[in-house]
Image (cartoon, rainbow, N blue to C red):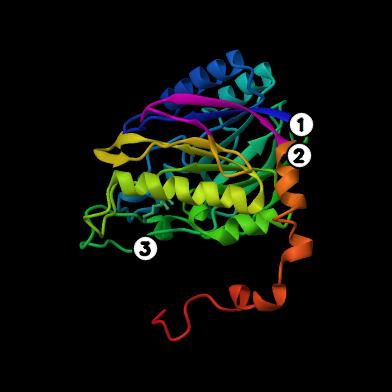
Amino acid sequence: MRKVVVGGAQLGPNQKTDSRARIVERMLVLLDQANSSGCTLVVFPELALTTFFPRWFMEKQSEIDQWFEASMPGPDTQPLFDRARLHNIAISFGYAELTPDGLHYNTSILTDQQGNIIARYRKIHLPGHSEFDSSRDFQHLEKRYFLPGDLGFPVTQAMGGRIGMCICNDRRWPETYRVMGLQGVEMILLGYNTPSFNSQKVTEGPEDRLFHNALVMQSGAYQNSSWVVGVAKAGIEDGFPLIGGSMIVNPDGRIVAAATTEDDELIVHDCDLDECNFGKETIFNFSRHRRIEHYGIITSQVGVLNGGD
Ligand code: CDT
């Protein structure tokens, strides 16, 4: 038995006018709740410290950079690290990272239970577009503000097992899970900000978005025999709705804890990393069953051949 008591700390909306300090205060409340529930690891969403600013078109770099963190921890985020250390809780959260070289990434970090950053992931699958698009109901400018991640999908020895991270849109791609699966991942930490509506397809609403959210995380967990902890920033942010649907999925693909609100909410599950073993040793024993001689185009080809891509 390798137990990790995981808290999925869903956040309600962050408005454009909310200060980092105010948002961190809400995160501290969730951390205190997680401590009372015996959590040893708490996962917060993508871009936890700000509104989902890629919905806004900006041209001035100084305006863009106000949404980024040039240091982690910084003055506003230090209290998070201090509280987590006090409670002996490892934390993971997403934020917009500005590197010392001036590069911009959509990043998640993982700390150990003493508040030291032990892993970093930079979002690889950046959805949306890079220029203002008047045909959309709202903008999704991740391709404008972020570079694609340059760290691959690292899996880190932590919490007595192998922990990986990905961010939001990454969860829709089976490659994300399999690249971590091939590193023996046992728990995938995953924050997201998903609009409740498709800005280009009026018929796709919250019900569809929640269905796809569960579908991809449950299948990713099952097909790689890994825990998946999916955590939303939810609710109406700057007037635009984001889905909730935070969940913890076991290595059999079943949802074992699920959020019921679109607000700050903690979901908790006592996860045994040894539950990954059965699937990894049987149906998804990769070294016995995978047929890589037929998988070559996955890495040599991006789009469908002659498919207009
Ligand atoms: N944050 C993020 O990656 N959101 C995307 C929205 C997709 S629509 C452009 C997601 O996959 O949930």
Seen at 61% across and 59% down, the residue is 150
Tally of marks:
3
Find the magenta span and give its range: 256-273
| Quadrant in the picture for residue 283 | bottom right
Residue position for label 1: 2
Mark 1 vs 2: CB contact within 8 A: yes
Q: Is residue 126 visible?
A: yes
**Foreground label between 1 and 2:** 1
* Residue 105 locus on image (x, y percent): 52, 52
Instruction: Tell me the distance, in whole angstroms, between the alpha carbons under discs 3 and 1.
Output: 44 Å
Q: Describe residue 254's horizontal placement relative to residue 162 as left or right.
A: left
- Work out whether residue 194 can be spotted: no
Q: Main secondary structure of the magenta part?
A: strand
Q: Position of residue 94 (x, y in %)?
A: 52, 40
Q: Secondary structure at mark 3?
A: loop
Identify which amino acid the numbered label 1 is placed on.
Answer: Arg
Question: What amino acid does circle 2 point to?
Answer: Gly
Vertical comparison of 14 with 253: above or below: above
Q: Nearer the viewer, mark 3 or mark 1?
A: 1
Residue 117 x %, y %: 68, 37
In whole angstroms, how far apart are the C-alphas of marks 3 and 2?
38 Å
Q: Which residue is mark 3?
A: 130
